[in-house]
Amino acid sequence: TTEIGGNPSGIAVGEHELWITLLKGDLLRFDPSTDQVTAVFSSEYTWLASPVLAFGSLWMTSLEENVVIRVDPATLTGDISASVAPSP
């Protein structure tokens, strides 16, 4: 097992990797074959959660700032895709 810290808040399963969101605002790419974090995307937003791989991108939400963030898994560049209403 590997300690990743940072309060994990979600996980998405890729073809050869796991994507783990952290409440502090990071997205980790984790290689289960080596048991290592292989990349970190640091967002300006916090409370990242609900990652999902779809349409060639990784999508996640910021529960605190009420936005949906799209990240290119190949380059780890991201942008805001939409502002959303706060959860009830």
Image (cartoon, rainbow, N blue to C red):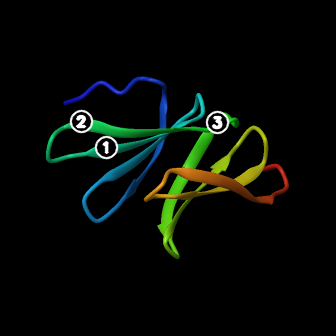
Q: Quadrant of the N terminus?
A: top left
Using the image, tell me which numbered label, if any, was put on residue 17.
none
Q: Amino acid at mark 3?
A: Trp
How far across and how far down the image is residue 43, in percent?
63, 38
For residue 77, above or below residue 9: below
Between discs 2 and 1, the one toward the N terminus: 1
Q: Which residue is mark 1?
A: 30
Q: Amino acid at mark 1?
A: Phe
Q: Which residue is mark 2?
A: 36
Query: Please, what secondary structure does the residue beneath circle 1 have?
Result: strand
Tag in front: 3 or 1: 1
Between discs 3 and 2, the one toward the N terminus: 2
The Cα atoms of the two marked residues, 3 and 1, are separated by: 19 Å
How far across and how far down the image is residue 67, in percent?
76, 51
For residue 15, above or below residue 62: below
The Cα atoms of the two marked residues, 3 and 2, are separated by: 23 Å
- Mark 1 nearby-residue class (10 Å; few <14, some 14–19, many ≥20): many
Q: Amino acid at mark 2?
A: Gln
Residue at (24%, 28%) from the top-left corner?
Answer: 2
Q: Which residue is mark 3?
A: 47
Query: Please, what secondary structure does the residue beneath circle 2 have?
Result: strand
- Mark 3 nearby-residue class (10 Å; few <14, some 14–19, many ≥20): some
**Cβ–Cβ below 8 Å for labels 3 and 2?**
no
Between 45 and 85, the residue placed more toward the observer is 45
Residue at (65%, 51%) from the top-left corner?
Answer: 61
Tag in front: 3 or 2: 2
